[in-house]
Structures are given as C-alpha cells and as structure tokens.
Amino acid sequence: MPDDFSAALCGLGAQVLQRDWLSANQTVFAAAGPHAPATVVDTGYARHADMTVALVHHALAGERLGRILNTHLHSDHCGGNRALQAVHPGVRTAIPVHSMAAVQAWDEQRLTYELTGQSCERFRADEALVPGSRVQLGPAWWEVHAAPGHDPDAVLLFEPQTRTLIAGDALWEDRLAIIFPELDGGDGFGATRRTLALIESLRPRCVVPGHGAPFGDVAAALAASRVRLEAFERDPARHANHAARALVMFHMLEHQRQPRDTLARWLLATPVFGMAWQVARPREAPAPWAQGLLDSLVGSGVLVAVGDDLALPTTG
Ligand SMILES: [Zn+2]
C-alpha cells in the first residue's frame, strides 16, 4: 500500500487487513470514545473465520471489538461474523438495511448462500446501515450510501474530509464483480452504472476495495469497470459465462482440489449455474455446458488436471 494511503488511513484510526479472493478485506478501526467502539468492516469467508478472529485481535492489540459492519452479506464478507460474535460477547452487528429481514429469518435463499453453494454460519444482526445516514468510525463520521449492482442491498462507506471510500465489491481496481441480479432477470447493469456514477461524484482519493490493495487511481478503475460493464451489456451471455467461471474458481479456492466428477455434480446441483446457463443460452444441455466450462478453466490455466482431479495450479 502506498505510504500516503497508510498515513491517511492511520489518521482515520483505520488499518486495512488485505486478504484474498476467498475472504474479503477487513478495515479495522480503533475505538475513539463512547460512540465509536473498536469496529471491523467485513469479516471474510467462514472457512477462514479463525484467521479473521486472530487478525482482528492483533490489529486491535487485544482491545475488545465493539462493532461489526458489513458492506453486504455475500459469504466472503460476513463469514467471520458468527466467530467474532462468539469471542466478543456484546459486539453489535450492523448490516445493510435491506438485508435485515433476510438475516432475522435466516433465509439462505435470499442471502444467496443456497444459490451459490457457499457457506455462512448464522449470525445475529442488531442494527441497520441506512443509506443517507452517517456512522462514526474511529474519530471521523462516515456517510452510508446505497451501492446496488453487484448486490442489490449493498452499501458503501465514505469519509468526506479525506475522501476515503470503503467500496465493498462496488469498485475494484481492475476487475468488475459479478452482477448477480442479471443472472436472475433483474436490472443489475443499470444499477451498477448508477453506483459507478455515484462513486465518481464522490471523487474519492483512496479506495479500500473488498478485494485487492487500496488504490488511488479511481478514474482508471472506473474506466476499466465501465469497459467491462459495456461488454456485458452488449452480450449478457458473456457476463453469465464470466459469472459461472468466477463462481467455480471461488469454490476451488475453498476446496483447492476436487475430483472432476464431484465438481461437475456440484455445479449441476447449484442453482446459480442453472441461472447462468439460461442466460448464456448455449446450444448444449447443462451437463455438456458444465463440462465445457471446466475444460475452459483448464484450457486457460487457472485449473490443472491432476489424474481424475481438478486443482488450483499451486496445489496441483
Ligand atoms: Zn460480493
């Protein structure tokens, strides 16, 4: 991370714990008075929840965690909530307001875990993050903005004095996150476009993305996202194929290595792939399409065949 970002984040009482593509980054704020307890924004994937607990403990130098905030409730952003709630009794958890009912009922379909075949342990939500409101994190007040597109309920957090943005998955430096509503017949592309325009209007100086390092060249990131978005709008089948590939790779980041038959069966049994298949409208039936998808991942080198297994290249 460039030094000037570290200094700016430090001035905000924040540390960014950069994780990977299975677990989203954490932004950790030290406590700053009675209304700003020590806080973590986003908590990674369930499989690595113990690591998240340890990293947050280290970042806070043992100080008690008082609050958890989630930019959205994809499994890689809130998978550590349950473990953090268990080790920090009394911690308050704030989630995007439009996800509140789904969490209270623990509706795994609405929360997308059933859809994507991903796991997330049930957690408690205490408060809603409402777009248009503000929340004190460390010494500063942060604006809560709606950030639909990738996830219809998502929010982002913006600190206007330093123009620092915690973007969740609404903006990455050089990729564009899956636009889930488009796989389900909803308007995701338009919402994504509006959220990119909102981010542009905020003129952030430093963006803390959900994945990858903090970055400052926001114009380049917005331009790259818009190029990707236009290509997907012109050809939604391309977006559906991209989504299917990214979701297989997420599953493989979790499992590292799997028999090809097991992976193909999982893919055919997981609803999001059926939705992607319908949008992609390939000539093949789902089973050969799934096999073609796995072949294409091997062909592009992101998976390797090891006997009857498929694996990540580093573990093959
Ligand atoms: Zn996400």
Image: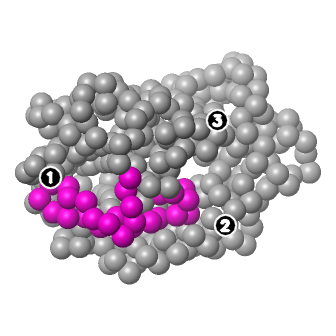
The residue under label 2 is 187
Question: Over which residues does the magenta segment extend?
Answer: 128-154
Among the two numbered marks 1 and 3 on one chain, the one whose residue lies closer to the N terminus: 1
In this rendered view, identify the residue nearer to me: 302 or 202: 202
User: Is 53 on the left or on the right of 74, as rendered?
Assistant: left
**Element type at mark 3:** helix
Q: Is residue 127 magenta?
A: no
Residue 284: quarter of image: top right
- Amino acid carrying mark 1 in the image: His
The residue under label 3 is 114
Residue 44 seen in this snapshot: no
Specify few, some or many for label 2: CA neighbours under 10 Å numbering under 14, 14-19, or 20 or more: some
Residue 270 seen in this snapshot: yes
The residues bearing labels 2 and 3 have C-alpha atoms spaced at a distance of 21 Å
Q: Is residue 283 above or below residue 216?
A: above
Residue 208: quarter of image: bottom left
From the top left corner, tell me how far across and down residue 161 is, in percent: 18, 73
